[in-house]
Image: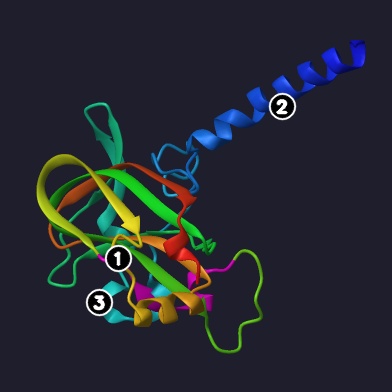
């Protein structure tokens, strides 16, 4: 009787301990741009490694500041190529749908999930740099402009065709890819995942 009571208490404690993680803790780091030492920790802003002249100075057009109660990443204009940033790559797990919520304002933004596989000659490991990967997939994009608004982006977000599933089978890592043509801001980016049979591939 006593052992049964103790077991029940232990089970309840485990349930209480585990429950918060099931409530949707974000899968990406520093989505609020609030790290005191590095406001862009968890994000890629420097694309000099690509040797693409359009984005050599990309990081110079990004900063972190406050807009009312929001701590946000601010984009300034940089010509027709725009300004971009991405979350650090995170592994894709088949059988799950990914949901990104964020607040965003500005003109001509595009937000999507970018899918990557290993670049040729790179030995797979657990913590890749973007330069070790090659983009092979883009999800349906969230687009818009205007004042602050709450937006949601999902992967897959559409009914997956056979061709899309073939591409997704090759994807090893995802990023949240944010691009803006004109000045704008992003705040409170979160990422969660939920089981989805459509993502079994």
Labels 2 & 3 near each other (Cβ < 8 A): no
Mark whose residue sits in front, 2 or 1: 2
Is 83 placed left or right of 138 in the picture? left
Q: At x 42% / y 63%, what residue is drawn?
A: 198
Q: Considering depth in this image, is 17 or 80 the residue closer to the camera? A: 17
Q: At x 19% / y 55%, what residue is drawn?
A: 76
State the extent of the magenta-drawn residues as a range. 128-140
Q: Which mark is residue 54?
A: 3
129 in the magenta segment: yes
Mark 2 to mark 1 CA distance (whole Å):
46 Å
| Residue count near mark 2 (Cα–Cα under 10 Å), binned few <14, some 14–19, many ≥20 | few
Q: At x 21% / y 28%, what residue is drawn?
A: 68
Q: Which residue in the structure is indicated by mark 1?
A: 58
| Label 3 SS | helix
Q: Earlier in the sequence, mark 2 or mark 3?
A: 2
Q: Considering depth in this image, is 44 or 156 the residue closer to the camera? A: 156
Q: Which residue in the structure is indicated by mark 2?
A: 14
Extreme residue toward the bottom, this view:
120
């Amino acid at each position: 009787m006593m052992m049964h009571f103790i077991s029940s208490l232990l089970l309840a404690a485990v349930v209480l301990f585990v429950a918060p993680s099931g409530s949707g803790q974000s899968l990406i780091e520093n989505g609020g741009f609030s790290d005191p030492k590095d406001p862009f920790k968890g994000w890629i802003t420097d694309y000099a490694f690509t040797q693409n002249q359009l984005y050599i100075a990309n990081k110079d057009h990004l900063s972190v500041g406050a807009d009312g109660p929001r701590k946000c990443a601010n984009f300034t204009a940089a010509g027709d190529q725009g300004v971009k940033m991405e979350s650090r790559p995170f592994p894709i797990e088949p059988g799950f749908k990914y949901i990104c919520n964020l607040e965003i304002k500005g003109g001509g933004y595009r937000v999507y999930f970018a899918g990557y596989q290993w670049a040729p000659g790179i030995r797979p490991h657990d913590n890749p740099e973007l330069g070790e990967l090659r983009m092979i997939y883009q999800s349906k994009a969230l687009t818009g402009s205007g004042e602050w608004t709450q937006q949601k982006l999902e992967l897959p977000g559409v009914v997956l065709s056979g061709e899309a599933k073939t591409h997704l089978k090759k994807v090893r890592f995802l990023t949240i890819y944010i691009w803006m043509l004109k000045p704008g801001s992003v705040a409170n980016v979160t990422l969660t995942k939920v089981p989805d049979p459509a993502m079994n591939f």
